[in-house]
Image: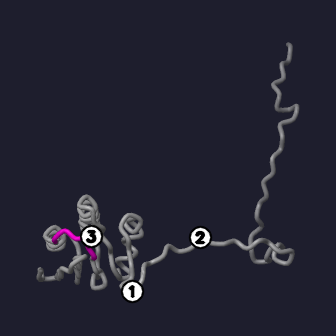
Amino acid sequence: MGEQVSERFRVHVSVRDESVDVRAVGEIDIATVGVLRSALWAAPSRSVLRVDLSGVRLLSAAGVRALAAAHLRVRAQGGELVLVDPTPVVARVLRVTGLHRVVPVVEASRPVAEPPAPVRPSPSPASSAPSPLAPPVPTMRHVPPGPAAQPVLVAA
């Protein structure tokens, strides 16, 4: 389809039979988001719209909104938006905003898996002793109410 360029940002779009690939390079902020938005809206309808973020140095809130809106638009057309190879800075923005939970984020060769939940090993007798450097951990226990918890009436 071609390339759209601004001073700090450019987008290249290529169309395939089953997908459209959008490669973004530069900074996506309020000044450049219009170029990205135009490219995403001009992309023909396919089953997959891939946005390659490996060349993006900055992703502002305006860029996140544009990607979220593109996700809704593509999904309404029966397709899927996929974000590919975000840089560490962009990946952090996707995590902080929660967009990575809505839009799939993949590496070019394989999908990015969610980190596994931390597994806590069962305590062994040797590891149950507190470390001399660790602060003491307070223990809580349930104390059933006794007679003192009952209201007492005193006659004067």
Mark 1, Cα crowd under 10 Å, few <14 / some 14-19 / many 20+, is: few
Instruction: Name which quarter of the figure residue 89 lies in.
Output: bottom left
* Labelled disc at residue 117: 2
Q: Tell me where residue 24 appears, x and y as whole percent.
A: 23, 81
Marks 2/1 in contact by CB < 8 Å: the verdict is no
Left or right of residue 50: residue 138: right
Mark 2, Cα crowd under 10 Å, few <14 / some 14-19 / many 20+, is: few
Q: Which of 89 and 77 is in front in this view?
A: 77
Marks 3/2 in contact by CB < 8 Å: the verdict is no
Left or right of residue 80: residue 122: right
Name the residue that disc number 1 marks. Answer: 109
Type of amino acid under label 3: Ser
Tell me the quarter of the image containing the C terminus. top right
Q: Nearer the viewer, residue 124 or 136?
A: 124
Label located before the other in sequence (3 or 2): 3
Residue at the top extreme? 156
Name the residue that disc number 3 marks. Answer: 47
Query: What is the image's colouring?
Result: one colour
* Residue ID at (57%, 73%): 116
Distance Cα–Cα, label 1 vs label 3: 19 Å
Type of amino acid under label 2: Ala
* Residue ID at (83%, 28%): 150
Location of residue 39 with respect to 69 vertically, above or below: below
Type of amino acid under label 1: Ser
The mark closer to the camera, 3 or 2, is 3
Element on which disc 3 rests: loop
* Residue ID at (88%, 31%): 147
The mark closer to the camera, 2 or 1, is 1
* Residue ID at (82%, 72%): 128
Label located before the other in sequence (2 or 1): 1
Label located before the other in sequence (1 or 3): 3
Q: Give the range drawn in magenta.
A: 44-50
